[in-house]
Amino acid sequence: MIADVTMFETEPEEQTERKTIPVTNGDEADDNVYLMGRPPLGKFLRFMAHEAANRESIDQGALTDEWRAAHNHIRTLRTWNPLAPS
Amino acid sequence: MKDPLIVNGFNTVPTNIGMVELDRMVVYQKHIDLAHVRKLKEKLGPAPTDEEIFRTCLSVDHPMPPVKWSRAHRDTYVFMSPSNDLRFLGTMRLKPNHIKDYPPPGTLVGVIGIAVGFGSNFLNAIYAENRLVLHNGSHRAYALRDLGVTHVPCIIQYVSSREELDVVASGDLADHPDLYLRNPRPSMLKDYFDPKLRKIIPIHRRVRQVTVKFATDDAYVPAV
């Protein structure tokens, strides 16, 4: 029996760092959750420009604003103590 | 702990299995495929039992994802799978008696196997510098947290130095350990659920492709 692919993981390396071929002839796209504010802005923008299925309609200024807001939010979280109960 | 994939795959540093709190886990994977998560959740159901959670995290069945391979050229083989856990596993030095039921092309002296396959697929983490970093299993961890599960069974590798980390870590954790071990607030699993830290992005589906090439060289050298 061939197992369902959903039983398997897709890690550990980040896809953006791999040799990928982002251009397709219009295959289906799946939604992904992307962590913002943590990777450098340039890396985030490159990811969006190369990987996002809707990259043609991306507004870089709006993306930069979103990244900046997330980055600022992370700064407010920096009191985190790894040993403290969550 | 007696599973051969644990014995052989987690034998570099002290390792055990423990229950970990998902919200305290540091993560280095920057994006999560929600279609994959949805399928995992469908398989788990709305209220998975402890046994189902254990089997999801530490499956002992080691089922095989779909995979196809073909010979592209005389010296090139291409493997493809929807699972991007497909990887080059290293080379294997085989002896003729390891090869059963395969007609030998000649009198075998030795056989070099180029192994392609899948990793152990256990949900596992690295404990280093008082932090627990999720090393494999982000999609399962995400799906389980999304279902309200707070603690999961996990293989934990205890790393006591950066030298050991260099050996057992991979990906961005290996490349930029300070981002996860020294940063006052590293990225954490719960951040995937924080509307202020996440963005939903449509990404084209891909299959993982691993290409294996080999070369041979015959020569005469001085018999000294």
Image (cartoon, coloured by chain):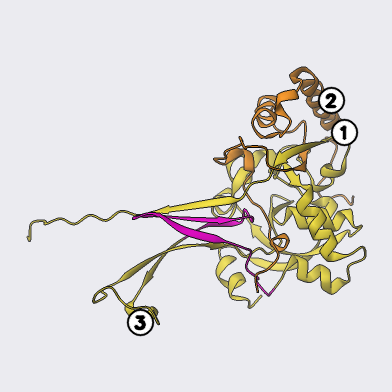
User: Which picture quadrant has residue B139?
Assistant: bottom right
The answer to whether the residue labelled 2 contacts the one labelled 1, judged by CB atoms less than 8 Å apart, is yes
Give the amino acid type for the residue marked by disc 3 in the picture: Asn
Residue extending farthest top: A61
Please indicate whether residue B218 sits to the left or right of residue B182 in the image: left
Tell me the SS state at disc 2: helix
Judging by the rendered image, the residue that carries numbered circle 3 is B97
x and y, in percent, of residue B199 in the image: 81, 35
Q: Colour of chain A?
A: orange
Q: Which residues are magenta?
A: B60-89
- The local crowd at label 3, few if under 14, some if 14 to 19, many if 20 or more residues have their Cα within 10 Å, is few
Labels 2 and 3 in the same subunit: no
Q: Chain of mark 3?
A: B
Q: Nearer the viewer, mark 1 or mark 3?
A: 3
Q: The N terminus of chain B lies in which quarter of the figure?
A: bottom right
Given the current orientation, which residue lies at the most extreme front position? A25
**What residue is pinned by disc 1?**
B196
Residue A69 is tagged as 2
Q: Is residue B132 magenta?
A: no
In the depicted structure, whether residue B200 falls above or below residue B156: above
10 Å neighbourhood of mark 2: few (<14), some, or many (≥20)?
Answer: some
Name the chain letter of the residue that bears numbered label 1: B
Q: Which residue is rendered at x = 89% and y = 37% of the image?
A: B195
Residue B219 image position (x, y, % from top left):
15, 55
Report the chain shown in yellow: B
Label 2 and label 1 in one chain: no
